[in-house]
Amino acid sequence: MALKGLDGALETIGGVLVWFVTPALVDGIFQALYGHMGFRAAHSHVTNHLLNSSENFAGGRKLFASLFLLSHGVTKIVLVTALWLGKMWAYPLLIIIFTSFCVYQAYRFAHTHSVVLALLTLLDIVVVGLACAEYRDQLGAEL
């Protein structure tokens, strides 16, 4: 659960940071990092790919990326905190929401083949399994 809390905090911070990324900021960073003409000439394919990726990210996908990270992060923080405080309602909600995250992440993985996304999905699956087991134990203890 601590990993999911940390994951949620990092996603929330990432969502806020993504919101403030502008094309001018990204261009400035890449100019500072890759502005040297010798580097550009030697690695033009890599440099062009990075510049194109930054333009796409900083452009139309910014709002989606920011809202996606913020919604995941805040949800995880709230649910993990509720579980640490012993709130029984958080178990079924966590199971439903994290299962939904897994389904969406599996869909995205089919398109992106991102190893990081696959690992995060596996972590979510483990958390759902642990939450199911703990919820059963908690219900058994109350009876």
Image (cartoon, rainbow, N blue to C red):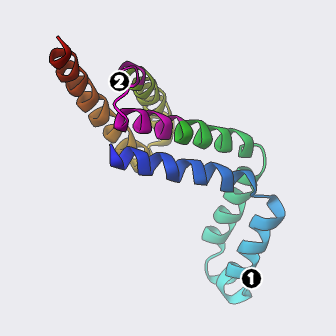
Where does residue 9 sit, x and y in percent of width and height? 51, 50
Kind of residue at badge 1? Gly
Q: Which residues are magenta?
A: 75-93
Is residue 88 inside the magenta stretch? yes
Q: Say which quarter of the image contains residue 54.
A: bottom right
69 relative to 82 in the view: left or right: right
Q: Residue at x 48, y 41 (%)?
A: 77
Is residue 90 inside the magenta stretch? yes
Q: Residue at x 44, y 33 (%)?
A: 79
Q: Earlier in the sequence, mark 1 or mark 2?
A: 1
Q: Residues within 10 Å of mark 2 (few under 14, many from 20)?
A: many
Q: Nearer the viewer, mark 1 or mark 2?
A: 2
Q: Secondary structure at mark 1?
A: loop
Q: Residue at x 22, y 16 (%)?
A: 139
Kind of residue at badge 2? Tyr
Q: Which residue is mark 1?
A: 35
Where does residue 16 sit, x and y in percent of width and height? 67, 51
Q: Quadrant of the C terminus?
A: top left
34 relative to 98 in the view: left or right: right
Q: Are marks 1 and 2 in contact (CB under 8 Å)?
A: no
Where does residue 95 sit, x and y in percent of width and height? 36, 23
Marks 1 and 2, how far apart at CA: 51 Å
- Pick whichever, 88 or 119, lies toward us: 88
On residue 91, the disc is 2
* Tally of marks: 2
